[in-house]
Amino acid sequence: MRKSASKQSIIAIDASRSNTYGSKRFIKTILDGLNKNTKLKALLFVTSENFNSYESSRVNIVRLNIGEAGFISILNATVVIPIKAYFSGASLLYSPWDIGPIISPIPFILGIHSPNSVTPKKYKSQKIPWLHEKLTRISAAKAIGVEFPSYTAANEIGQHMGIDPNKRKVIHHGAELSKWKDISKGLEESNSENEF
């Protein structure tokens, strides 16, 4: 049974693949922005100790104890985290690292930050690029919005992957976190589908 947590006050964030300094800094900037500009509580799903030092009464760190590499990482992002977010009472999930839910028990926003889908084959960084792209396409189709770090990325990757232009949003890293205030207000006022 789903917990009776205040559904409209919780955003879940998949930080399970935030293992580099840059990705850790990106997530921490988002958390700082949420704390400063909203009243939302955050559930932060992690697989490492990267966020142990983050302190906020509104951020609950949920450690996934089932690994972080390869297939397990994909399973976490596509199935485990969306289900856990749903049962934790979250109303929205942010999945920032290309591969997100393939099931959507709650609305989610997908972030696509990797240019691999439009990168020449010899420069691709994933071990299995075709699988990465396939899962990204599935996630993007199910997402209520897809976030890109630039207009070029939104146009090039969005067109390559057939992502509806109305779903594409550009959020320059760290520069537009005040927009969470508008998103938060919309979440609080809405009992229907969440707008991105």
Image: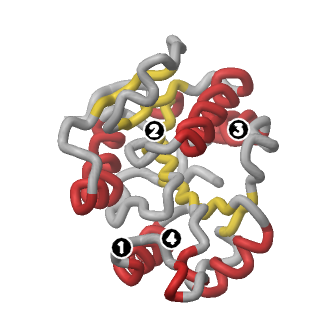
Decide: is 60 above or below 97: above
Instruction: Point out residue 157 in the picture as x, y percentages from the top left corner.
Output: 64, 78
Residue hosting label 3: 180
| Quarter in which the N terminus is drawn | top left
Residue hosting label 2: 12
Q: CA distance from mark 2 to mark 4?
A: 17 Å
Density class for disc 2 (Cα within 10 Å; few <14, some 14-19, many ≥20) is: many
* Mark with earlier residue (1, 3): 1
Query: Badges 2 and 4: C-beta atoms under 8 Å apart?
Result: no
Instruction: Point out residue 84 in the picture as x, y percentages from the top left corner.
Output: 28, 41
Decide: is 19 above or below 145: above
Q: Nearer the viewer, residue 147 or 128?
A: 128
* Mark with earlier residue (1, 2): 2
Residue hosting label 4: 140
Q: Which mark, by number, is residue 127?
A: 1
Decide: is 70 above or below 36: below
The number of callouts visible is: 4
Q: Nearer the viewer, mark 1 or mark 4?
A: 1
Density class for disc 1 (Cα within 10 Å; few <14, some 14-19, many ≥20) is: few
Q: Quadrant of residue 49?
A: top left
Q: CA distance from mark 3 to mark 4?
A: 21 Å
* 101 horizontally vs 178: left or right: left
Q: CA distance from mark 1 to mark 4?
A: 21 Å
Density class for disc 4 (Cα within 10 Å; few <14, some 14-19, many ≥20) is: many
